[in-house]
Image (cartoon, coloured by chain):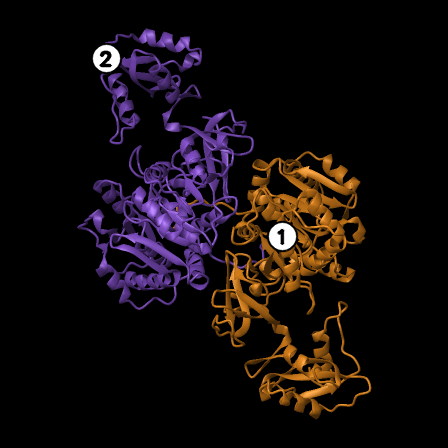
Chain colours: A orange, B purple
């Protein structure tokens, strides 16, 4: 039976209501190409209403609009104005190549691009608006829009493409509802616990996964928001922390490593910073310890484009637990399955694929009809994890690095490390190759150390001598090569390697 | 355009998932007629699954089921088992008269009643199950239910009737979604900020407004939950605080006044209590100060049955601000309107009716087709408030005590206090009487002080001499009476008085 509760859309408008009505004196600080911009939520809200009018005049109502931009107030204004008008802001990764940018903008059928001047994006198909003084003047000259429509909460609001290391970038569109619930979940005491007295510095980019929804969460609760602008260096970050009394900073571990190194070198400290939120990779123990010495706690988060950033969080005080990715946040569920999709126990030992569902998890990719869910319910993360009895997860591998043979998994990373521990081997990579009987079988590519001779049998014998691998884990073939293909960022390009091996073996 | 985000029901099942999977070692403590019951979330979850089987065996699946019960673990089990099966738990006010209980149970068409033994509710129409050892044994003997259905989040979960001081009780049905969002909102740092390391003691009754959703919020985040059981006295409450290290207690101000008096008398303290949440009436300044002396902060909340309990919160450190009811929590909006429904400014001066909307606000009453919303959007609270520029509300009157004359409001409370300040008057009450021209006009009933003589003209002259009231505020008639009708709880019974005056004046 139905409830008597009213239908109320959990949408960007309901967040904007708080910004405008409850917190108009709160501040937003933005580091831009032209220096620091500092204004109140009230001024921000007025600018959003003027920007919305400008978008209207350019026929960009209920449209898809791309941004290729840094974390600034201008980007933040688009975060609100575009969805408030019923459109979708497509945040394009600044680090994409021009061809990738063109690809995702075409895929998404964006009607305009808004971008920072240093990015130098050009298009002969759609208008490109550059954040500069002319842009600001044009906004200022507008009559503010009075009323925004009440958008259905399941409508799209922000779009983002995966970074595409294993193929073409794939699009995910967050809904008004998913942004609201995810942001509210971040405010919970047991998640980030951001309050109106916090000063939040999201260094994670607004051009990817909406800076983990930190801009929305901060504005929802009236926190002071500090946006670090274009290409912030350690020095810029430390200056912002000092100048605007930042209490919570959010960035990948590498950023914090740079920040700590800078602070040490310059004999500074990190006060008043209290909390560092980090994710994307495991924070090194040394970093966590160093931050503690400066009085800063580390929260270790896990998530991905497909889960709208933060999905699990580890706030443990126990340094030995800090390598775990932690507990599911609110509105989000996890499960552990084997290669057949059968549930595995949460015993801290069984490793399987992490599958997830929740109010901010994608069910499909944009413009892609493939059913990507397990049992029509669970999104398959591709991460191999263990789950401890208390529900905390620990990522141990990426599934795409696993080989599925006879319904069981073989860890290519384990095999690679073992082969490379043989003293005649310089480098090794193991990939799975289609096999009629077993599904997949492992094949190794090996680069010999200069001046060394080694045979395939010798390597297999060595692997056997380690007494670590079941017989069926051993590679079916070992191919000697001069070098192994890498991506532009120096990672093994397993997709290219797999194709290469397949053509070597005359498979398709 | 739609998002790519999956449909995920924010329902009791998603809260139960956390209870069972993430927090199974956390504890629930329950004060019962038979003493203290202490068990883990894991044991609780198993009991819920067994109770669900028992409900199934009694044909109570997708049914409406009444509880007339104190805050105990058995009541908590019903909070989960009934909605998990797709039914609605109708929490009946223990303080209702038998006839009111029968009325609401018939209205709701409940199929069974679950109740504590001291309540002695009997029915010749539907089965009544009493919480006792036999009840526990029957649950224990069941095979736990394995799977619960995935209930649509807009379905009803918990029903509650208003206490009905101004007519028949009116029913409100909270949805799975409203419970989830309201509970999550309570967990936010800027609302109650409950964490898994808190110990929560909801003294506000589970038989009314689901104990402000505190049981759900606590279990959602893995806090230790302490349930104070039947008719807890100050001594019981202090013992629970001491024995189970309660950190947050929730109750009406009168309860805390008793607790503080008891602690003073017995020369105890309140440690480890950190926070008191109070509402239903304004907490007296003296109480707030006393609690501070014991190291306890007071949060002042406002809400009503129709807003699922806590809707605004004041956590100010400024003691002069503590009489305000505070800021809207997440998923909830407020507005201020005059008698014509026109918006009034948030200037801390204009008084008007508080109207509200949000994810946990009712749009209608159960079984009642009346449209009760302003502009089909806003629920009219009947509270007269001022709103400060920062969005904090201050309740100044109840609308039903206001007289609407010529489109403007006259405060009967103001007039009553003024008349009673005249030294020949013992008591006075002012009510609004229908008037063809003005809508309503004020009429005063006055009881003279023993041995004093006073005329109507004299009182009107006195009111004029105060220079406080516009001329049209002055009562059209002053009627002298020997006494003024009161309710059983000693409050002015304005409904009865209005009828009495109307018949005196031959109006209907």
- Single out the mark in the foreground, 1 or 2: 1
Task: Tell me residue B340's x, y (percent).
Answer: 46, 26
Q: Is residue B8 left or right of residue A140?
A: left
**Dot 2: element:** loop
Task: Tell me residue B267's x, y (percent).
Answer: 35, 40
Instruction: State the residue in front, A242 or A184.
Output: A242
Q: Which mark is residue B450?
A: 2
Q: Which mark is residue A295?
A: 1
Q: Residues within 10 Å of mark 2 (few under 14, many from 20)?
A: few
Q: Are marks 1 and 2 in contact (CB under 8 Å)?
A: no
Q: Is residue B363 among the parts visible in the rendering?
A: no
Task: Tell me residue B46's x, y (percent).
Answer: 35, 64
Residue A458 in the image: above or below residue B86:
below
Tell me which chain the residue with mark 2 is part of.
B
Residue pushed farthest left?
B124
Tell me which chain the residue with mark 1 is part of.
A
Q: Is residue B480 among the parts visible in the rendering?
A: yes
Residue pushed farthest front?
B267
Residue A131 in the image: above or below residue A436:
above
Instruction: State the residue in front, A76 or A326.
Output: A326
Write down the quadrant of residue B60 in the picture: bottom left
Q: Is residue A99 left or right of residue A174?
A: right
Total labels: the figure holds: 2
Q: Is residue A457 left or right of residue B305?
A: right
Residue B285 in the image: above or below residue A435:
above
């Amino acid at each position: 039976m139905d409830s008597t509760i009213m239908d109320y859309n959990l949408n960007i408008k309901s967040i904007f209501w708080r910004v405008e009505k409850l917190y108009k004196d709160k501040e937003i600080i933005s580091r831009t190409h032209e220096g620091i911009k500092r204004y109140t939520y009230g001024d921000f809200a007025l600018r959003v209403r003027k920007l919305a009018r400008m978008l209207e005049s350019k026929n960009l109502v209920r449209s898809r609009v791309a941004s290729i931009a840094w974390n600034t107030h201008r980007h933040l204004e688009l975060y609100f104005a575009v969805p408030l008008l019923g459109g979708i802001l497509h945040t394009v990764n600044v680090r994409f190549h021009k061809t990738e940018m063109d690809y995702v903008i075409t895929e998404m059928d964006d009607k305009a691009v808004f971008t920072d001047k240093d990015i130098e994006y050009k298009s002969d198909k759609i208008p490109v608006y550059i954040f500069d003084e002319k842009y600001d003047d044009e906004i200022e000259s507008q009559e503010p829009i009075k009323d925004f429509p009440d958008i259905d909460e399941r409508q799209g609001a922000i779009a983002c493409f995966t970074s595409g290391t294993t193929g073409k970038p794939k699009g995910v569109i967050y809904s008004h509802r998913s942004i609201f619930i995810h942001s509210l979940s971040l405010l919970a005491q047991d998640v980030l616990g951001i309050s109106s007295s916090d000063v939040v510095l999201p260094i994670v980019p607004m051009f990817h996964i909406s800076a983990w929804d930190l801009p929305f969460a901060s504005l929802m609760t009236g926190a002071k928001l500090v946006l670090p602008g274009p290409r912030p260096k350690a020095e810029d970050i430390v200056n912002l922390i000092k100048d605007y009394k930042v209490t919570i900073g959010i960035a990948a571990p590498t950023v914090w490593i740079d920040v700590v190194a800078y602070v040490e070198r310059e004999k500074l400290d990190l006060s008043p910073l209290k909390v560092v939120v980090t994710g994307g990779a495991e924070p090194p123990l040394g970093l966590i310890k160093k931050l503690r010495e400066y009085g800063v706690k580390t929260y270790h988060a896990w998530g991905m484009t497909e889960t709208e950033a933060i999905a699990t969080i580890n706030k443990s005080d126990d340094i030995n637990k800090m390598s775990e990715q932690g507990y599911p946040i609110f509105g989000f569920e996890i499960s552990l399955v084997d290669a057949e999709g059968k549930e595995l126990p949460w015993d801290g030992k069984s490793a399987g694929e992490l599958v997830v569902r929740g109010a901010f998890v994608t069910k499909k990719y944009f413009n892609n009809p493939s059913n990507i869910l397990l049992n029509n319910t669970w999104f398959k993360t591709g991460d191999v994890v263990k789950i401890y009895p208390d529900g905390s997860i620990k990522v141990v591998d990426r599934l795409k690095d696993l080989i599925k043979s006879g319904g069981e998994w073989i860890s290519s990373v384990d095999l690679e490390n073992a082969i490379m521990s043989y003293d005649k081997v310089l480098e090794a990579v193991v990939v799975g190759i289609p096999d009629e009987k077993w599904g997949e079988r492992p094949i190794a590519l090996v680069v010999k150390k200069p001046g060394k001779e080694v045979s395939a049998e010798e390597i297999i014998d060595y692997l056997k001598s380690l007494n670590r691998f079941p017989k069926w884990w051993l590679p079916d073939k070992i191919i000697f090569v001069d070098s192994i293909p890498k991506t532009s960022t120096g990672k093994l390009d397993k997709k290219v390697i797999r194709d290469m091996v397949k053509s070597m073996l005359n498979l398709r």
